[in-house]
Image (cartoon, grey):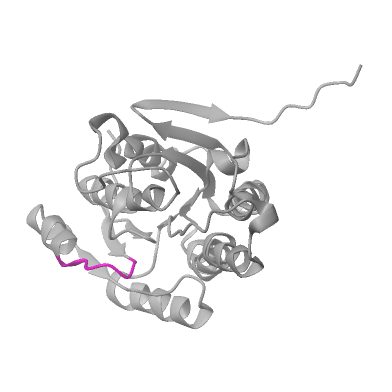
Amino acid sequence: MTTLNGKTALVTGSTSGIGLGIALSLAKAGANLILNGFGDASAVIAQVQAFGGKVGHHPADVSDPAQIADMLAYAEREFGGVDILVNNAGILRDKSFKNMDMKDWDIVMDVHLNGTGYVTKAAWPVMYEKNYGRIVFTSSTSGVFGNFGQANYGAAKMGMLGMMNVLAIEGLSKNIKVNCLAPAAETRLIGTIPGIEVNPDDPDPMRHPKLVTPVVLLMCAKDAPTGQTFHAGNGQFSRSAVFVNQAL
């Protein structure tokens, strides 16, 4: 069983959906918890406090470096810094590339790829100083394999794999482990895709966000791997890898 006692976890986009499930699982494993998101966090805070966890909430916009700096200052002041970072904040603006307004390209890039880079950049020196860090980038099969109508989202999500590959190397000497998560669950975000109906308040048991969390605990553990991409959803877990074969 993963024990995170004494560690502080910051989870972006954690007031609902997959981020909320991840946040609760980290808190139940003993981590102090910093929630991030624009939603009402009061019920989550009460839930964490009910089982004895220390929890706070900072609604920083992950695409705004000034707000991120304030959030990390809050983490330092109230929790002594950050040991675990799960970059989960996200939006969708789906449309075929032919019909896509590039404003929708920019906003998805800003939240997913730039936001992940900004928050990680702010947390990186803190982890360097601690000689300890666990970072998760929430990627997607839309980036790894592709999905119609998601050129912006897929490009941002695949960009996370490139960043992971580099940071896993750069962080190794400082005990900073960096991995990617490609989740599948029934959430409000999925419900914004045209033609897909979901009930995020009562998700299908086999597509519940909580089924994603076990592999996140692995990526945040003391003996976590690094530089890996894990898929999680529907109660199943797998790993993607890149292979180079000699051309015929």
Position of 247 compared to 191: left or right?
right
Outermost residue toward the top in this view: 248
- Please tell me in which quadrant of the rendered image residue 52 appears: bottom left
Residue 89 seen in render? yes
In the image, what residue occupies the spot 47% across and 54% down? 133
Position of 69 compared to 210: left or right?
right
Residue 73, image x and y in percent?
40, 79
User: What is the quadrant of the C terminus in the image?
Assistant: top right
Residue 226 seen in render? no
In the image, what residue occupies the spot 43% across and 40% down? 183
Residue 116, image x and y in percent?
53, 61
Residue 33, image x and y in percent?
27, 60
Position of 239 compared to 205: left or right?
right
Outermost residue toward the left in this view: 50
In the image, what residue occupies the spot 45% across and 58% down? 90
User: What is the quadrant of the N terminus in the image?
Assistant: top left
From the viewer's side, name the closer residue of 164 and 200: 200
From the viewer's side, name the closer residue of 187 and 81: 187
In the image, what residue occupies the spot 26% across and 59% down? 32
**Which residues fall within the magenta stretch?**
36-42
| Type of secondary structure dominating the magenta stretch | loop
How many labels, in total? Answer: 0
Residue 24, image x and y in percent?
24, 50
From the viewer's side, name the closer residue of 21 and 169: 21
> Is residue 107 positioned above or below 24 on the image?
below
Is 41 colored magenta in this rendering?
A: yes
